[in-house]
Amino acid sequence: MNKTFSVILLLVIIINTIRYLYYIFTGPVEAYFFVMLAINFAGLGLGIYYLFFQKKQKRGRG
């Protein structure tokens, strides 16, 4: 994946996280919202790790 696509994907995950937090705080609480929020937090953590903290692997060693 290139960097711009990763940033766009991370923005979508952030928007979905905010949306599900809004649903939990305002509407009737359903278990579905907590499951989707957990999935979004996992994706958020992996996306931030991928974009900022991943070490670049060198190809063609030898």
Image (cartoon, rainbow, N blue to C red):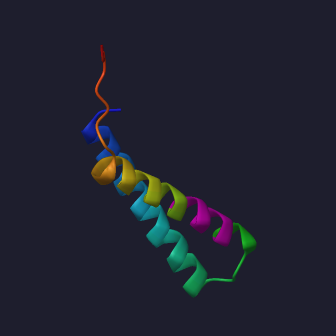
- Quadrant of the rendered structure where residue 28 is? bottom right
In the image, is 31 to the left or to the right of 6? Answer: right
In terms of depth relative to the viewer, which is nearer, 27 or 11? 11
Q: Residue at x 30, y 18 (%)?
A: 61
Residue at the right extreme? 31
Residue at the left extreme? 4
In terms of depth relative to the viewer, which is nearer, 8 or 52? 52
Magenta residues?
34-40
Residue at the front extreme? 62
Q: If the image is split into quadrants, where does the N terminus sit? A: top left
- Residue 49 within the segment the image draws in magenta: no
In terms of depth relative to the viewer, which is nearer, 59 or 51? 59
- Magenta stretch, main secondary structure, is helix
Q: Is residue 13 above or below residue 61?
A: below
Residue 62 lies, in percent from the top left, at 30, 13
Q: Is residue 52 above or below residue 15?
A: above
Residue 45 lies, in percent from the top left, at 45, 60
Residue 55 lies, in percent from the top left, at 31, 43
Residue 22 lies, in percent from the top left, at 51, 78
